[in-house]
Image: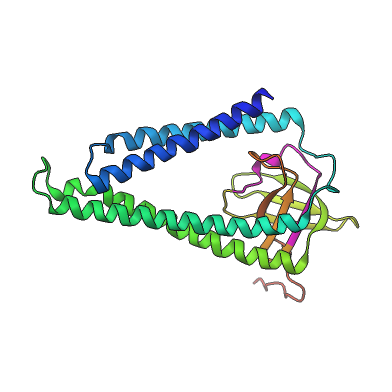
Amino acid sequence: MGLRRGRAALVAASVLVGLVAVAALVLALVAGEPYMPLVVPFAALSALCAGWARRLGRRYAAATGVVPPGWDDVDLDVQTTRVRALGLRATGLAVLWAVVTVAAGVGAAVVLTRSDTDSPPEIAAATPLVIIVFALMGFGFSVAAAVSWRRRHRAVTASGWRPATATVTHGSGPCTVILTLDDDTRIRTQSLSSTHGAANMTDFPGTPVRFGGADRSMVVLFPRGLFRNGPYAVPVRSLEPKPGARPTARS
């Protein structure tokens, strides 16, 4: 219980401190308040809290086990709806990044037109311009995530959820998730770039899961995630050759 509460407290602290960093950034860029020096320390503290929460999450999973009593009480229709909700969340993040981009652009324009700064306007505007670059990157990743989760939701809706056991291996690259069906058929998949990763499941081979979708639009539903005690959706792509595909000729 202590690990769980500590993890929850660190997650809450990370979110709150991150919001303070965003608020300081907006005030510095839009209102011209001298809060810019606070942005980096608060952002670093938010990342530190998130890192410690992740460590406590792994310790909590190792201490309590990962397999729930069963999947009988899990409403898979609700889980399908939650896959769609992940796309909506990514859309919200894209909107947030767009707001940050606009705020930084306004701040840069204000700095360039002011004449009462101690440093040249081009140098003073460097910080908001850097923020614009990172915000545009975040916007692009969020839009891509929103489109991908929407596609996965359609694929899962079409295929439904199927039972399997999952074994996760993690090397230097993306995780490999090997799904074993009831008839001992094995499907090799690979996790995709997402905030919903499978690396925390490497210590639990043979975990009962549900999976749906096909090809690059697959989702593996684990019993729980690093910060979530309920079913946890991880996006993966199939590494198996498509039916009818011809092997590539080698010289």
Residue 237 location, x and y as percent?
A: 67, 60
Task: Assess whether residue 111 is covered by the magenta stretch.
Answer: no
Q: Quadrant of residue 86?
A: bottom right
Colouring method of the image: rainbow
Tell me if residue 61 can be seen. yes
Q: Position of residue 143 (x, y in %)?
A: 49, 62
State the quadrant of the C terminus: bottom right
**Which quarter of the picture shows residue 116?**
top left
Tell me if 52 is positioned left or right of 156 in this view: left
Q: Nearer the viewer, residue 149 or 103?
A: 103
Q: Residue at x 20, y 55 (%)?
A: 109
Horizontal side of 181 relative to 44 (left or right) equals right
Above or below, 118 against 174 in this view is above
Q: Residue 88's x, y, as percent?
A: 56, 59
The answer to which of 53 and 5 lies nearer the viewer is: 5
Total count of labels: 0
Residue pictured at 19% horizontal, 52% vertical? 110
Task: Decide which of 28, 187 is in the foreground and name it.
Answer: 28
Residue 197 is inside the magenta segment: yes
Quarter of image, res 37: top left
Magenta residues, start to end: 196-212
Is 112 above or below relative to 57? Answer: below
Give the left or right position of residue 176, taking residue 142 as reference: right
Is residue 228 depicted above or below 177 in this figure?
above
| Residue drawn at (61%, 65%) of the image | 150
Of residue 206 and residue 148, the one placed in the foreground of this image is 148
